Image (tube, coloured by chain):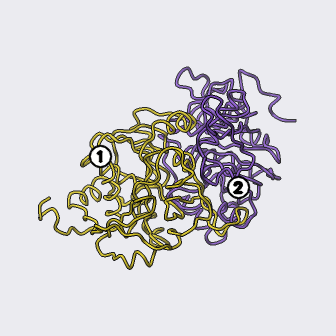
């Protein structure tokens, strides 16, 4: 029985383990934040502590980083939908790069426009949004599911980016309240809109207070559950609370370069085990 | 310019690249700053500190519009791009409502580039399901290069693997007959020289101090076209070098783009130690 049945609009709090249990095999899982900033790392690690972590996931991220590379390395991901999968100054995402180069992972090419217009379409309740992106590049050949249409006014050819949605979105917040209101920071990524296209939205938060009354980026009605996760973005940042955990990211990259992803993962999962 | 200012100032290639980038900035420009491109950030800020005091920055980190600057960082980059943002938006708003019409100037770093300035940031290898090397991805390149008039390229480590006669994948649109709006890349800055596109073909216009046409040709995978008035790239001034080293980028973040292997990793570790985030 899912812990969801316990939740009410007045109190959406779940434990991290209860929240992580909501992700099912084969689902589309979206991870919020951007690059090395405000990623739901604590949630991902908890997902990987399950006796049987979910497999066959479609991973949806505006950009994917360390948190996503853990999921790929652990064998949870069948395909990715993102416009960038890497570790910024820390280089290529090692497990993604290896899996995608070896043909073990399906990469669905996305760009800023295909994700942004696709999310816009879903939010607007229509099947697509038109755009002038991609025309003349190889992207249409790489995404045969994406169609073009004729602008009925000008006659121009446009790309019809299909609506984008997901089963579960996980977004890390600086602070949230019991009713699901959540405050992010200025480095939003696509989080406000992502919350609108997800079947379920899990907010992990540095702090949970009784009531937020201003400066909310995700209003409660969009949010399914809130989970306390102090330092839950680390080693990505939660500006202005803490910067990117550079030493930890170096340690990860070096462990993978030495072929020891499994040892690294076992180490970090043990550290935080409740 | 006086002989004094022209006299050879000791500089490194990363500083010359940043200076060449800065020279492409005009006062009042809106400059887009991409992902993990500190040479570009250094060049933009240098331009603002010298000849373009009214340049604005639009950053992929924080999706903000920024007019002030702060020294470059790795672990604390948000102190600049979020902390000093005048306004910010989500990336959905930026991608749908701003980039197609605001057309900022932006420097991209290609994984492969062809003579027409088309470029590839998808993968190396013709089998998409099983490439020789998967690259991180294209960000907004297949979007903005299709309609923007302000696309520039830079290559910190010029090689035949990057300058190729034929791309594996075309994710950035160059000087192509498929183009309906915007323009192909204006300029390409590498660690060996500066190129433009005369009549749609990449053309060497200046050679960096110490490089030669022969050496550039040897490291380019297609026959070079050379401008009739080919000359040496003017070196940085003493003040430009001082600004980069002492004010804009004292940690040397820009060098993460020109170093490789162990040297790069050691330098990154040093930056992180000085930022206080190594433990």
Compared with residue A223, is residue A39 higher up or lower down, i.e. above or below?
below
Mark 1: give few (<14), some (14-19) or many (20+) Cα within 10 Å.
many
Q: Mark 1 points at which residue?
A: B48
Relative to B75, A264 lies left or right: right
Mark 2: give few (<14), some (14-19) or many (20+) Cα within 10 Å.
many
Pointer 1 chain: B
In the foreground, A79 or A265: A79
In the foreground, A271 or A102: A102
Q: Whole-Å distance between the Cαs marked 1 and 2?
A: 39 Å
State the residue at coordinates (30%, 75%). B210
**Callouts 1 and 2 on one subunit:** no
Pointer 2 chain: A
Compared with residue A84, is residue A212 higher up or lower down, i.e. above or below?
above
Residue A226 point in image, percent of width and height: 68, 33
Q: In which quarter of the image is the N terminus of chain A?
A: top right
In which image quadrant can residue A262 be found? Answer: bottom right
- Residue A57: image tag: none
State the residue at coordinates (58%, 56%). A86
Please report contact status of discs 1 and 2: CB closer than 8 Å, yes or no.
Answer: no
In the rendered structure, the colour chosen for chain B is yellow
In the foreground, A9 or B180: B180
Residue A33 point in image, percent of width and height: 59, 42
- Residue A107: image tag: 2
Residue B5 point in image, percent of width and height: 15, 62
Dot 2: what SS?
A: strand
State the residue at coordinates (46%, 68%). B264
Compared with residue A14, is residue B26 higher up or lower down, i.e. above or below?
below
Relative to A104, A69 lies left or right: left
In the rendered structure, the colour chosen for chain A is purple
Dot 1: what SS?
A: helix
């Amino acid at each position: 029985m899912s812990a969801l049945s316990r939740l009410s609009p007045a109190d959406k709090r779940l434990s991290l383990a209860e929240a992580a249990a909501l992700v099912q095999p084969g689902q589309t899982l979206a991870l919020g934040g951007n690059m090395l900033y405000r990623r739901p790392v604590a949630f991902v690690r908890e997902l990987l502590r399950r006796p049987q972590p979910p497999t066959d996931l479609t991973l949806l991220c505006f950009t994917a980083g360390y948190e996503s590379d853990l999921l790929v390395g652990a064998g949870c991901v069948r395909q990715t939908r993102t416009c960038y999968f890497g570790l910024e100054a820390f280089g290529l995402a090692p497990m993604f790069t290896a899996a995608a180069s070896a043909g073990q992972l399906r990469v669905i090419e996305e760009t800023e426009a295909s994700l942004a217009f696709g999310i816009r379409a879903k939010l607007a309740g229509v099947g697509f949004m038109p755009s002038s992106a991609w025309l003349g590049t190889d992207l249409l050949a790489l995404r045969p599911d994406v169609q073009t249409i004729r602008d009925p006014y000008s006659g121009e050819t446009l790309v019809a980016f299909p609506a984008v949605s997901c089963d579960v979105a996980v977004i890390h917040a600086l602070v949230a309240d019991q009713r699901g209101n959540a405050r992010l920071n200025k480095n939003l990524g696509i989080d406000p809109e992502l919350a609108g296209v997800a079947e379920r939205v899990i907010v992990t938060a540095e702090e949970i207070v009784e009531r937020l009354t201003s400066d909310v980026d995700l209003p409660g009605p969009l949010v399914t559950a809130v989970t306390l996760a102090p330092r839950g973005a680390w080693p990505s940042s939660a500006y202005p609370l803490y910067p990117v955990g550079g030493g930890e990211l170096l340690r990860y990259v070096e462990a993978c370069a030495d072929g020891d992803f499994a040892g690294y993962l076992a180490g970090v999962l043990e550290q935080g085990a409740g | 310019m006086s002989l004094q200012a022209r006299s050879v100032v000791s500089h490194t290639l990363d500083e010359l690249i940043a200076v060449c980038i800065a020279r492409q900035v005009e006062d009042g420009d809106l400059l887009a700053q991409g992902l993990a491109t500190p040479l570009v950030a250094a060049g933009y800020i240098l331009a603002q500190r010298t000849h373009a005091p009214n340049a604005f920055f639009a950053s992929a980190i924080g999706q903000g519009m920024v007019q002030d600057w702060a020294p470059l960082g790795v672990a604390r980059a948000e102190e600049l791009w979020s902390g000093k943002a005048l306004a910010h938006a989500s990336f959905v708003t930026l991608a749908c409502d701003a980039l197609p019409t605001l057309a900022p100037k932006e420097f991209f770093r290609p994984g492969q580039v062809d003579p027409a300035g088309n470029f590839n940031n998808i993968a190396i290898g013709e089998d998409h399901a099983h490439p020789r090397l998967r690259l991180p991805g294209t960000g907004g390149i297949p979007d903005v290069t299709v309609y923007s008039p302000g696309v520039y390229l830079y290559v910190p480590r010029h090689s035949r693997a990057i300058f190729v006669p034929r791309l594996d994948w075309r994710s950035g649109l160059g000087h192509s007959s498929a183009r309906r709006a915007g323009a192909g890349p204006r300029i390409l800055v590498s660690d060996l020289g500066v190129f433009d596109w005369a009549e749609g073909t990449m053309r060497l216009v200046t050679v960096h101090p110490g490089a030669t046409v022969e050496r550039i040709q040897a490291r380019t995978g297609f026959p070079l076209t050379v401008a009739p008035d080919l000359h040496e790239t003017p070196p940085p001034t003493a003040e430009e070098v001082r600004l980069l080293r002492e004010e804009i980028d004292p940690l040397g973040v820009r060098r993460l783009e020109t170093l490789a292997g162990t040297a790069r990793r050691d330098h990154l570790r040093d930056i992180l130690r000085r930022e206080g985030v190594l433990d």
